Image (cartoon, grey):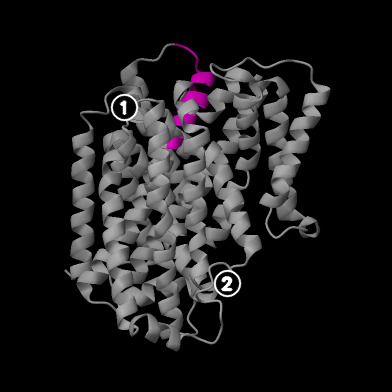
Amino acid sequence: MSLPLAILAGYIVLLYAVSWAATKRSRGILGFLLAGRGFPAGIVAVMVAGLAIGGASTIGVAENAYTSGISAGWYNGAWAAGAVVVGLVAAGRYRKLEVSTVPEILGRSYDTPGRIIGVVGQIIIQVVITSLQYVAGGAILSALLPDVFTPRSGMLVSAATFVGITLVGGYWAAGLSNVINVVVIYVGIVAGAVLCVRHAGGPAGLAAALPPGEHWFDPVGGVGGALVGAWFAVMITQAFSTQAVTQIAFAAKDGRSAKLGFALGGLLIFPVGFICALFGIVAASRFPGITPALALPKTLLALHPLAAGLALAGLWAADVSTAVGLLLGSSTLIIEDVWKRLFPGEITERRQFWLSRGITLLISVVTYALAMSVAGILKTLLLGLTLTASYTIVLLFTIYAPSLCRRGSAFWTILAGIVFLTIWQLVPQIRIAPHPIYLAWPVGLLAFLAVRLLDRRPINLLPGSR
């Protein structure tokens, strides 16, 4: 067995051991899906960081940096900003609501159609993001261990690990394993980046070996201000309203833990993008003309087996941490907003517990099948997250300006977002902005304000809303 493979195998065994230990804390449906609402600030922080640092934040950033330079790291900078802003503005309030899902908030305040369309949109978002983690996991394993894994077998092993950890220990397993994941991520990518730059002759040697251009170390110029702005708009928007993100706040032990945890999570997220961008820059200096997606794997394969193994485990840890949280977020949506609505009768705690595991397994099969047809990790992810603009508009008005909300606001605002994104995909002529997020916000706000004028029915106020 090669050293990188041995390191990977040891990491998987460690994750399963932690997940098994977490079973003592994951009893009952509340324990399995929301960790019994017992996450302290530290676990909240690593959950946020683990969710953010996935395939797009590592492989995707290095791929982008291969042509755009260090400015590709602002993708993670945008995610970090989203975590901090939510910590300051909304995380504490979300925890005080004592809810399990975003559509549950909509159901409390708005009409039934608003909750239904809220569930549909959230499931679409969750499924798209989860499927991308399988793609990234397969790409990492096949690129760094080509004698062992193909892209498809790498996806299968990734999926089996993601699902296994989730089924064994639930949300506490996600939280405790993310403590390990964040450590492994930082050890792996920092060690790999330092060695890659050293092998390139240090900063001076690296700069001298790069293709001509002033964009390599320009803080914004390589990617461009318009795209960096779009990243910030998308990532701050989605952090307010994606189920997998908000569920972390719902699972905190109190409002203070939620607020502090999100802010600390942002600090953990911020450096990773720029570190991974270095891999892409090194690849541009050493391997000109390759497919950009190979930038990070090519660079790591040139390292000592121990360093390559640590970096491999770190990159794969990023994928594991993201996928586990997403799977449990999707399961919570199905249980709370679909199953309990279709079958409202009494259901025992034990049956709910096993039902949640069965639904998690079903979601994993669906997302794995979708992953087989996904291409372009970063582009697909950003497009899917654009849909969260409508949710964020509704949630912020619901909490901070409920007097402007009407019973139909949630349904029509979210529907407008779905219709807009569909038209954006099918009618290229309307793409007058560099990214759909720049139009998604105006479209959502116009829809919301139109309902405000046409619908006279007030909403049910949430506790603590203004």
90 to the left or right of 276:
right
What span is in magenta? 329-345
Q: Is residue 56 above or below residue 211?
A: above
Instruction: Give the total of numbered labels.
Output: 2
| Disc 1 + disc 2, Cβ < 8 Å | no
Amino acid type, mark 1: Gly
Check if residue 127 falls in the magenta segment. Answer: no
Element marked by disc 1: loop
Quadrant location, the N terminus: bottom left
Residue 414, by quadrant, is top right
Point out the residue furthest to the top here: 346
Where residue 43 appears, as percent x and y from the top left, is 31, 38
Residue 12: horizontal and vertical position, in percent?
23, 52
Q: Amino acid at mark 2?
A: Gly
* Mark 1 vs 2, N-terminal side: 1
- Is any part of residue 322 visible from this angle? no
Disc 1 marks which residue?
A: 38
Residue 247 in the image, given as x and y percentages of width and height? 44, 33
Q: Is residue 126 visible?
A: yes
Identified at 39% across, 29% down, the residue is 256
Q: Secondary structure at mark 2?
A: loop
Q: Which residue is mark 2?
A: 222
Q: Is residue 94 above or below residue 142?
A: above
